[in-house]
Image: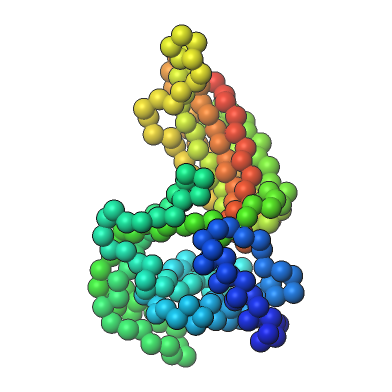
Amino acid sequence: MLTTAQREAAARHLLAARRARQPGPRLPDACRPSDLEDALAIQRRVQELLGVATGGWKCSVPAAERVISCAAIFAPTITRTSPCPALAHGGIVRIEPEVAFVLGRDLPPRAVPYSEAEVRAAIAETASGCARAPWVWSPIEDVVGAWAELRVSSLGAVEAVITAGEEASAATCVTALAARGLGGAALRPLRAAPRCRTAYVGPGSLAVALPLPVGDDVRAKVTVDLAAVSNPSRRTLVENDIPALR
């Protein structure tokens, strides 16, 4: 467990990166949290230093390895109109589609967990949302032990056997390409939307299967984009072109 001084150092490190609006180095080992209690305490301290209110919470379904997976959404960062400002890095704006639940009444802390029926009854509105996700950390390395082996099955699907030495999200996509462009131009995507599937993998392997496009003069571009859960800026991209079904 970190000391109060170490938590303070971590919070101020994160605050400096936030105010600079530039990706920065990872937290130093001396103040890097290794458990949920320290991590949540650092989150709260960053919010105290910013002096902002909580406008909502970003969270995911609890898992065995992540019993608590949440973070406060600061009220000044919530936009309810479109268009809205976004921070770009290298001309790219990262966004994440979200589902937003607006509560009609409070669910105050209590010893007994709320049931699903109680939570549902408290929801007043469900809406689509879009999270603007700037890079927080500078990329320093790939996903640990990441690789993907691509192969075509007899059932007309491409199978990606994805391996990672740590927990990572893996987005696998199959895009149909024109095999020959005009005047010998490079391969270009066809109008059909790519077929994608995202799953979590690691430590270990996972097999993901997606159907191949069909047609003459068509090839398929297969990409597997892995991002470390602990630091999404650490990524590994595997891609290859393979013939489509005829």
Point out residue 190 in the picture as x, y percentages from the top left corner: 40, 25
- Can residue 244 be seen here? The reply is no
* Residue drawn 69% across the image and 53% down it: 140
Q: How is the image coloured?
A: rainbow
- Can residue 210 be seen here? The reply is yes
| Residue 145 falls left or right of residue 112 | right
Point out residue 61 in the picture as x, y percentages from the top left corner: 47, 67
Relative to 121, residue 108 above or below: below
* Furthest residue toward front: 20
The foreground one among 7 and 128 is 7
User: Total number of numbered labels?
Assistant: 0
* Residue drawn 37% across the image and 73% down it: 75
The foreground one among 163 and 32 is 32
Relative to 29, residue 203 above or below: above
* Residue drawn 43% across the image and 11% down it: 182
Relative to 242, residue 86 above or below: below
Question: If the image is split into quadrants, where does the N terminus sit?
Answer: bottom right
The foreground one among 98 and 150 is 98
Point out residue 197 in the picture as x, y percentages from the top left corner: 48, 44
Point out residue 45 in the picture as x, y percentages from the top left corner: 55, 81
**Occupied quadrant, residue 99:** bottom left
| Residue 217 falls left or right of residue 169 | left
* Furthest residue toward top: 183
**Occupied quadrant, residue 118:** bottom left
* Residue drawn 39% across the image and 80% down it: 53
